[in-house]
Image: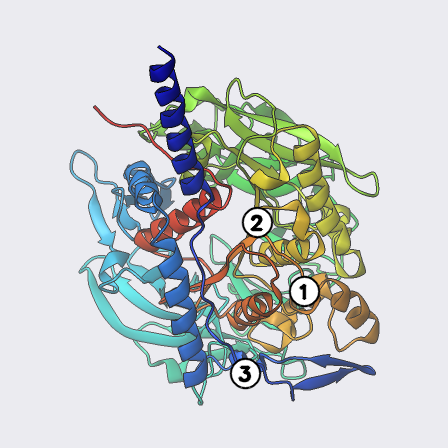
Amino acid sequence: MLKYLSFSIVLILMISCEMEEEKNSKIAVDYPEVYRDSSVVEDYHGTEVADPYRWLEDDNSEQTKAWVTAQNKVTHGYLDQIPFRDKVRDRLESLWNYEKYSSPFKESGEYYYFKNDGLQNQSVLYKIEEGGDDTIILDPNSFSEDGTSSLAGLGFSKDGKYLAYFISDGGSDWRKARVLDLETMEHLSDDLRWIKFSGISWAGDGFYYSRYPASKDGSELSAKNEYHSLYYHKLGTDQSADQLIYRNDDYPLRNVYAQTTEDEAFLVIGETESTSGNSVKVKDLRKANSKIQAVFDGFESDYSLIDNEGDYLLFLTNADAPKQKLIAVNTSDLKATPKEIIPEGEDVLQTLSIAGRKIFAEYIHNAASQVKIFDMNGNYLTELELPTIGNIGGISGKKDDEEAFFSFSSYTVPTSIYTLNTDTHKYEVFKAPEIDFDFDQYTTEQVWFDSYDGTKVPMFLTYKKGLKRDGSHPTMLYGYGGFNISLLPSFGITTLPVLENDGIYAVVNLRGGGEFGKEWHQAGTKERKQNVFDDFQAAAEYLIAEKYTSSEKLAIRGGSNGGLLVGACMTQRPDLYAVAFPAVGVLDMLRYHKFTIGWAWATDYGSSDDPEAFDYLMKYSPLHNVKDVAYPATMVTTADHDDRVVPAHSFKFASELQHHHQGDEPVLIRVETSAGHGAGKPTSKIIDEYADILSFMYYNMDEKMSFPVKD
């Protein structure tokens, strides 16, 4: 008996050792050698700052292309060795394969909607046909063979005869415009280029749009954008004949946007110097040769046109109302004080829609959607009771129609489309998705924690019901914290594999966002930007202290301004996180304003051209705060066509990390090809990217991922 027992113990020990060896065995990383040019030093107000990887800013050079190829070879060589990576991709593809619908919208008496069959790279525009199969109007999957060209905006003519639309190639912010005849389903000869940061605003037999001058040297993906201009294009004419409506030659770093009212009575022109604050001008399109007149000057406040009510223009604004209000401007007397329709309330008034002669006001209450209904004079009627705590995706309807549509989602509620009766305020499901996932097993809670200065900050946590708080759960902490952008509860397929692998998905509503109004936003800007990073790190410490997770099981992720967030936090507190994912991040805070539209972000960040701003930017700029320490397992992600936050940010940061990193954890960069800042990215590339992200996360937490097996 003792002999057999001893053999059993030996066998158990052998198996245990094999398991331990498998768990602790790490994939080796052989980083490519990267040239450091020590001669590049710049003087900032008396302080010399080295920039040894500035050569990577030239996205057209052969040296940069070779660097990208070498880095991608290392990264994909690493990812390909993660044993469960393919299983993660298969599971994501399975989850993703369901029909997805947008809210229907009405144009000239016809209803349209977008639909994706499941794994289509781009969603398709359909027209609803009574008593028959719906008609495909526009299939963006036909724009390119690999699905990397996408629909980037559209506008129907008032008579419903024409559809003008934008195409983005490879995820770029640059657009080209085409026009489709909806009766013949043939394209017109109209072909417009060099469009960027623009809408399509129809009036008569043409439309208004915004563009920059044509690039002459092939540097359009990184060069500074200047002299944004508003044009009017008449159908059937060459772009060279388009009429220049407005450009401010005295201020080349201002952008100009146009919007026509639903009845095409007015053209409203907005001019901006940055991402917040705008001036407003108006032109009465009912009168021949009417002049453009000023409505609001300066850039201290935001004004968003909702529509018109006769001669009155309705604007949502934060002027003297940090949480926003609705006002009406009399175009017959622009000097008169605007009339207040819906006053500022306790919650942020995020946006408004007019349908059925009622105003549907979407508020943010404790970082979730709330809808209040008013009559056209601003008298409160009732509140629209939403399905649960979540995010309403806007109410789509016409002024005089009793039928409208809206979408709704939450972290455990897939996006569903509802039909709304604007008279009774009752709604019912129009389209609900069928997804291979048991949502009833999961729950979302909202917690509040103290940031470093005592500010109360909210965070949503989603996980499997019955979760034991023992510090063992892999956790993805996500944040943004900038530009007055609010993170409300919304559904995402990519979080589901985390949830079904004993994980937690956490989203924190940081200062710098718009969840609590203008003051909350400004508390995370310029010299106060450190508040954003403090909030995020306090969120991480809360999750650890409350035993949801531990430092060894905590990953952080954010994109764009959120990429800056992750870069700053991982360089300030590398000990706090196991894994870091800075995505398309603003990581060089001394030079961000020198590329494409970066100059417009200075109202949030400040600029290194200013000595005071240089001091605080230098303190947190991720690129300039990399030290000789051990960093978390890191995968920087960017794309070769990102002309919003140019990939040089990520290239330089990854190079600096690899040079200084003292630990054994991998520090990699994944550079997507034929993709941009994120908009329009094809489904296949999204699935590939998140398979890499999730498998990298779990592997570097010494965790495995497994998924339900179908019968």
Tell me if residue 512 can be seen: yes
Residue under label 3: 55
How far from the left and from the top, in percent, is residue 216?
Answer: 44, 89
Tell me if residue 513 can be seen: no
Is the residue marked by circle 2 packed among few (<14), some (14-19), or many (20+) residues within 10 Å? many
Residue under label 1: 628
Quadrant where the C terminus sits is top left
Q: Nearer the viewer, residue 295 or 344?
A: 344
Tally the marks: 3
Q: Nearer the viewer, residue 410 or 159?
A: 410
Element assignment for label 1: loop
Q: Earlier in the sequence, mark 2 or mark 3?
A: 3
Q: Could you tell me the amino acid type at mark 2?
A: Ile
Q: Nearer the viewer, residue 323 or 401?
A: 323
Q: Is residue 31 left or right of residue 575?
A: left
Element assignment for label 3: helix
Element assignment for label 2: strand
Q: Earlier in the sequence, mark 1 or mark 2?
A: 2
Residue under label 2: 306
Quadrant where the N terminus sits is top left
